[in-house]
Amino acid sequence: MSDRRRNLFVLLFVGGLVAASLLVIFTKPTKLGLDLRGGVALVYQAKPTKQSQVTGEAVDRTIEIMRQRVDAFGVSEPEIQRTGEDQIDVSLPDVTNADQAASQVGKTAQLYFYDWEANVLGPDCKPDPQNAQVTGGQASGSGAGGLSRYEAVKRAAGCPPDESGKATTNGQYFLVDNAKKTVLAGPQESRADLDREIEDRKIATGPDTDVVKTSSGALVVRAQKADNGKESTRYYVLRDEPALGGTDIKDPEQNFSGGATGSGAPSVTFNFTDKGRAIWEETTRGIAQRGQENFFGGNPQENFQHFAIVLDDELISAPYIDFQQNPDGISGATGSEISGGFTIQSAQELANLLKTGALPIKLELISASSVSATLGRQALDQGLLAGMAGLLLVSIFLLAFYRVLGAIAVFALLVYAIFLFALVKLIPITLTLPGIAGLILTIGVAADANIVVFERVKEEVRNGRAIPVAIKQGYRKGITAIIDANVVTFMVAFILFMLATSGVKGFAFMLGVGTIVSFLTAVLLTQAILGVLANTRVASSPAALGAQSTRSRFRWDYMGRAKYFFALSGLILVVGALAMGAKGFNLGIDFTSGTRVVAEFQQPATESEIRSTLAPLGLGDAKVQGLSGAGFPADRAYQVSSRELKPAERVELEQSLDERFGGTYSFETIGPTFGSTVAQSAIIAIIASLIVISAYIALRFEWRYAVPVLIALTHDILITAGVYALLGFEVNTATVAALLTILGYSLYDTIIVFDRIRENVPRMPRATFSQIVNRSNSEVLMRSLATSASTLLPILALLFFGGETLQSFAFALAVGVLSGAYSSVFIATPVLMYWKEGEPVWRARRARVAKANDGLVPAYATAAGGASTEVEPEQKRGPGRRITEPEDPERKVSKEEFDEMVKEVQADTGAAPVAVADEEVESDDVMPSDAAADLSPEEVVFEEDVRESKPERRQKRKKHGRR
Amino acid sequence: MGLLAWVTMGVAIWHFAIFLPDRFFGGIVGSFCFALVGSALVAFAISGFQVPGNSDVTIMTALEGIPGALIGMALAYFIGVRRGNPALDL
């Protein structure tokens, strides 16, 4: 297929895709993430129970049950997914009450029925059914006869182990303070879990503290809640021999006590399974008979015995069995009812929990966040504004710098934006704020690819090639660097996606998808457009391409001055290290754990007013930070960061603020486990990225090229970290994502420089490595500056318009990109140069050059008279590479093409190769032997031109659409 | 956090190795590795075989990275000289 037909085909194909994409955009809805539409996000960590270990199967089963619970909760478009080995992310759009959602979705819901009096253990660890001091008598389960938690744990520890095989635990671990007689931590299923809890909650241990393990035969349960819903502080110790479990019941429903004729209080009714019914009847019969046996007259109610319903170690209800009404126990044929102390909502919740069944594993809530719809909408607006600003800035830059080429690139960027948005809707990808950041960054990636090619095209034009050939050569030579850079960016995005937390995953996914799409639009589409335009007046002059100037190189002794840049970097790093030592990092709650509340008030507020509101709540040391200038109205938006707050504490905080200022609130609570998970995954991601990047560079270049890349990346990351420490910016998960992204971006520039060094090494067989590096740097500096600018512009848009959430991220990226551009030229290449110059072959060459130049090695390789020492490297010659005809037969042949044709002819006739460099010509006795070499470009007549005169050939061409 | 401060200081010190004639074992990359590892190991020893956390670091923590980096680079240089690496002064 000819180039012209291929280009037209590509344009038609892209046109069709654009039409299809527009159709998708206008017909499909956009799926917005919680941070943009409002809702609740919960992160759980799975822990083993006696019944099940944390296996993939158990986690999957847990997710399935959680999904059923969420469905029962009535949430649309929920997302529940596994993260890593033992974490589960739950996203509940449009839900506002995070605490209720957490209690519904993540509750283990292990339900057990106990014969109460027969199992409540007294001081000697034996049941004492007649002793109201132990059982609570007719107030059973309400706390009467109960113990403090410390006493209950101590009693349970001294009880004999389970022998029935019915126990629900293997014993539980607690940390107690014997002096204060309090329980500090627990219950945990293992000692390791307890140790982790102690560490995470930073609980001080000492001579008075002790780890206590309860017996497997005894279970500490909390007394049931008071009628006002308040948690009880009294506990009982039960012999852990439940009669029935949650699996023995079916069809639980919220109902009203006693039906139409009953009290009408909310209750939960259920039926029994066949096995459950039999056990139920037997158990209640035993309870009734015991009541009967102990009745010696008087008020029979005083002798009613009870059964207890325990959910997750908490007593839900302890109803009595009326032995007079039910002397043979209660038939399970019509099911049963749990009543007492329920509201309609709590009864519905319990019914739903029982309906979906217990989770096979225990879940610990390690992070919870809630975003109000208003703040979500604001974040979306900020993200979109940043995106448009980024696109506009990059477009202006491309148009100003590359004119016609820039216009083509801008068109390609618009097509890219359409494709990507259509993909977001089609897949569908849940669009989050970090995802929008990823999208905006890929604008820079797409523009970078164009810049790499355009600079190559301009270079070819400046070297005298005709524009169509320059375009072809530019794309051919630029494509390897683009592929290398895009592959690395994609790999980093992939690693980030695999290892990062959910918020960062959105960013990584968009970065990865965007990189692939941008490659298609920035390379294939622009090449096709340029190919079509190459023979038109639009792109006929070098000026139109911005290549009219011949001053394309920044000839400067980069390697000679490398020492000073090294010293500069060294000084910056010293300052950074001192800042790290003196100030440390301002770690956000993602790492330290805590609660962050973002409030947008209805009335103006000052920091001191907010502090005075918080002080009575014991939060006087909370960090209050104004958010004005980040898209919020002045004096109305604040962020409060404090220690980890319990749900009740957080609600109290919000209520206090609301009473005084009014407003809407979003919050995020991060547990210590989540922080350590984030830090751990960040370190793994950075190491994995460095390994993958090194392996790729070693494969694509050679292993000695990989090491300077790693050193430059280390330099960039440490400088960014140092700047963060110096300026005291908060380090959060977004900063970690930014650091990883820096790895990819920093590499982009380095790959461009190394690609040119690799290309120049065979071209300059008599130059020292430092001269080759100088030459390469001078050739690509403009390109590096342009790609850095095109990446930096969208980042600046994020920094200024992206809102508070993205500012920290954008700042880290901006520092990293600047450092990356600098380190590519002034750190990576000098290290490579120093290392290579140490090799014997380069040492020898350096000695030769020094000897020929009075002991000095010039910065640039030039022969006598300032001529270049380049030679055209030997290339693999294939039919596709030979110039035997121009694209357009009517077009004149350029000097460059003419020289190339001369070499082709010499290759065919077996003549000795002609070095194009002047030095080669004057020093060697090789002279052109072919007559064609003596012709001027204008005198060359192509074979094809002769055939043009033949009418039948012309006809055939027309048939194929050629001129 | 302490480790990061030590390593940053070590890398910072290494940047000035470029002013010496390159006789390092492993060249400039060798000096980098020795400075990096040296700063971490010696500082670790100086701080009593503990890595200070984010709230425990002081300006001295960063300075603890200096001796190890210098020792590491000196060691790389010494090994290079012993192995007869010719000086590379660019």
Image (cartoon, helix red, strand yellow):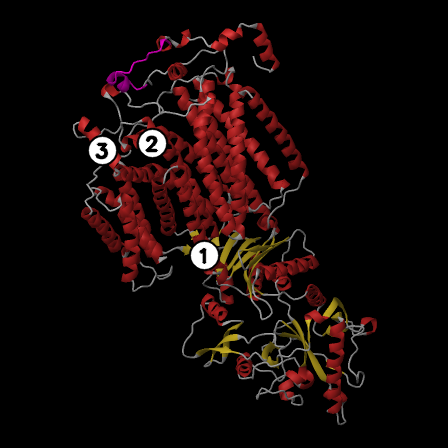
Range of residues picked out in magenta: A915-931
Classify A7 as above or below A645: above
Q: CA distance from mark 1 to mark 2?
A: 38 Å
Q: Residue at x 81, y 83 (%)?
A: A325
Q: Is residue A843 left or right of residue A667?
A: left
Image coordinates of residue A133 in percent, x first then y, are 62, 88
Camera-side residue: A800 or A13? Answer: A13
Instruction: Say which label, 1 or 3, has the lower sequence index.
Output: 1
Is residue A917 within the magenta segment?
yes
Q: Amino acid at mark 3?
A: Ala
Q: Residue at x 57, y 14 (%)?
A: A962
Q: Is residue A838 left or right of residue A283?
A: left
Q: Is residue A177 left or right of residue B34?
A: right
Q: Amino acid at mark 1?
A: Gln
| Residue wearing tag 3 | A844
Q: Residue at x 66, y 42 (%)?
A: A29
